[in-house]
Image (cartoon, rainbow, N blue to C red):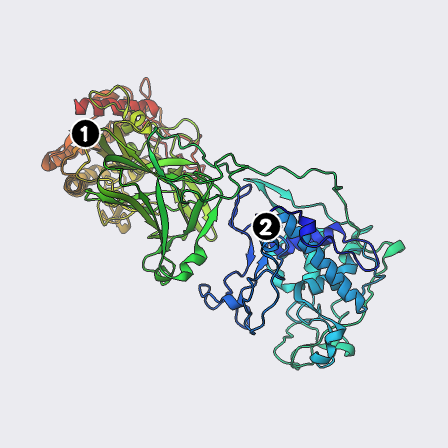
Amino acid sequence: MGAYQPQALVGGRTALTGGGRIPAQVFLGITAQESNMWQATRFAAPGATANSLIGNYYGIKHNAHGQITDPWVINWKAADCGYGITQVTDGMRLPGKPYEDGSVRPAKPRLYQEAVALDYTANVAAGVNILAEKWNQTRKDGLTVNDGGPSSIENWFFALWAYNSGFYPKATAAQNGGKWGVGWANNPANPTYKPNRTPFLESSLGEDDYSHAARPQFWPYPEKVIGWAARPLEALEAPGTLVHGFRPAWWTEPRFRTTAKPPVNLFCDTSNECDPSKIKEGASNDSPATGPCQRADWKCWWSTKVEWKSCGTTSHCGFELFRFNNTYPEEADGNSHPPRCNSGLPIGTAIVDNVNTGQHPAGADFRRCSDSAQSSGSFSFDFATPSAKMDTHQLGVGYGNHIWFSTTRKAASPEAARLKVTGTWKGSSSVSGWTRVLVHMPNVAARAQQAKYTVSGTDSVSPHRVVPQRIRSNEWRSLGVFKFTGTPSVSLSNITEEDTGVDVAWDAVAFQQLAAKPTSVVGMGDSFASGEGVDESGGKDYFRETDYKENLGSDQVINKCHRSKRAWVRQATLPGKAKSIGEISDGYGDVDLSFVACSGARTYHMWSGGRGQYNTLPQMDLGYLDQHTDLVTLTVGGNDSLFTDVILECIALAGVKLCQDAEIDKKNPDTGEKTGELTGPLKNFLPTWITEQTKPRIVQVLQQIKTRAPNAKVVLVGYPKLFTGAGSCVPGIGMEEAPWLNDVIAPHLAREMRAAAATTGATFVDPEQEFAGKAICGSPESIHGIVISGYAEADNDAPQPSMKSFHPKISGARLYADALERGLR
């Protein structure tokens, strides 16, 4: 953009007729009502750049009742073109672009338009002048309020009325059938607004009531602005930090603030053909018979001065609070969501950004990234229809200070065909051979649990890799290692099978070429494999995308997979390696780990076509197994053997009945749903259940792994006995119960797991020798007993025991790693 001074660009500050100036809170009230004091779109995060805030950019149509019939139909002629914090509309259309009525209005110069759209100071300068012009126009034709002085908040009622819905000057009366003034839409007598309403943001007791902001349609525009002037909005200044947008105007007594709202019948009499007797509950604008306006064309325009309170020396009107003088420095730009400017990847890694080389991400200069994008390839979008662009947005965050994002849609939904958008990163043809493919996850606007990346140009039989994006940090995630035989590319669309539409982001993709094929490891399974309990800091040892819960409207999105950074598959060291699997993989070395285990997983959460957990897909369908996979590790079968149900029953019946004699609800082995039957005594039921139900399902899991990863060594790791001795350190577990639990849960299941592994050619490893004397109540104790502190973000709700209960500690994960290493040797 060319150089400019904001005030000079808009033609200098417009002087008010009769002198004075606009009270600060009147104008600040406008910014609160027009835009929530935002220059950028509502998608913007605090301290991040984004698209401009534009009123009805796509011309979405509303019906007679104010409802949107189809939110995805573009009608450019109906576009509002109101920009930024004050929603400047005049002159902001492109030159020669008509409105729906065919009219074409003068366009402002391009520099003016860009400044108003992109720079809040220019936008404010333009908005100030528009309000001043409305004051001058209404005052010129005699529309004044109270004593007419500009210093009183209430005296701006007509100017605010005109600011929002326009003003019909006296000079235009002839062409309007003799009518002129401010329109019917914002008249306080209009039945659109409830006649018994309190002042905006004020309760019937004179207290703050910000619930009004959720239904502002029940107040006319001038009342809303004055309400905001009296009670400023709160907004995010930084993540988790709410502050007032400005200081409030003040009145000498609270009752005078209440009467800043005029009587509802003040602007309704014979002069504007309005019947005040019809201002009542249930009135409408359907016809003159049903409402106060007695004209079928609704030109009940008001054109005379009014007075409803004394201002000036009697001080019944509101006063501004002028906080800043013109020497006060502008606040520094926020930086709440800093971008990632340096990749942190090995030298020589080719990075393909989501903007192409030479493009200029907004705000890169003050956020310490390059002001010109550098990309080792190209990025492009494919939109199913033009409507798909309506739900595609950008933010100044993530790698290189720029991302795109959209909203996930279910494939079977009626919107999917119209709103599908696919972004494709294409790498250089010089990328070939064994290559690690990584995707960058930004710290905001990425919440999809089923981001399905498709890798092309390889010989992999599994080109689709599904990744959870809700990292909440600028981090890379590996899609695995591929052998490229053609031009490399990675594609991602917004079509998933998630329960709730959430943000899916396109950031950067990286191709790290490797000298030789690395060892490809896939860690699968249940809570014992994911690392449930392998945490010492309230969930901070879990990967953040696997430990969260948040409310999205009426829906709760949750993930309790609890994949620990110190899980045993990450602690273990492969034969011939000097560092652990996790260390080498995290360092982009010659081991690549794909870790997909999930706490609570049963066999049907693993096999293809089964059931996903926490808005994701079954582990087989995540795509990480292929012909190049070298090692697959897993534990599975404990949940299928009703481990959690049995333990809970033992504790619940403490002192009442031995848990081996208890009965629990029988569950469908394929769905986990209760059947309405009881199991009978557990000592008789469980051994048969494990043999007849759990074992064949483990076999099915192992067979599918072998089919998808035919060249992989598959290691099935068992479960240790939970208790050392009689387990007397755990409340509710008695002297006779711990031995039974130790026998039925671990050894019996181990025998069936060993048989399942032998049937499918997998290796079974029993960790019992590593845990001997070190289980619950052992020394050192390496398995948690009942845990009632240190809850993770997504955990059981207290006072229920934490999900860590009866799972290995960090030391227990190390014992598991020892068992795996023994099995590999």
Judge the density around disc 1: few (<14), some (14-19), many (≥20) Cα neighbours within 10 Å.
some
674 vs 108: above or below: above
Task: Give the farthest residue toward the right.
Answer: 313
Location of mark 2 (residue): 39
Q: Of the residues shown, which amino acid type is indicated by label 1? A: Pro
Q: Of the residues shown, which amino acid type is indicated by label 2? A: Gln
Q: Nearer the viewer, residue 735 or 288?
A: 288
Is 321 displayed left or right of 753 in the figure?
Answer: right
Check disc 1 and report its element: helix, strand or loop.
helix
108 vs 632: above or below: below
Which label was assigned to residue 53? none
Q: Quadrant of the C terminus?
A: top left
Task: Give the farthest residue toward the front.
Answer: 2
272 vs 795: above or below: below
User: Residue, x 37% and y 32% (percent of image)?
Assistant: 804
Check disc 2 and report its element: helix, strand or loop.
loop
| Residue 297, position as x, y percentages in the image | 65, 80
Mark 1 or mark 2, which has the lower sequence index?
2
Say if residue 264 shows up in the picture: yes
Task: Give the farthest residue toward the top.
Answer: 779
User: Residue, x 31% and y 48% (percent of image)?
Assistant: 491
Judge the density around disc 2: few (<14), some (14-19), many (≥20) Cα neighbours within 10 Å.
many
Q: CA distance from mark 1 to mark 2?
A: 65 Å
| Residue 428, position as x, y percentages in the image | 30, 41
Which label was assigned to residue 747? 1
| Residue 770, position as x, y percentages in the image | 24, 21
Is 98 displayed left or right of 582 in the figure?
Answer: right
Q: Nearer the viewer, residue 513 or 338?
A: 513
Say if residue 680 shows up in the picture: no
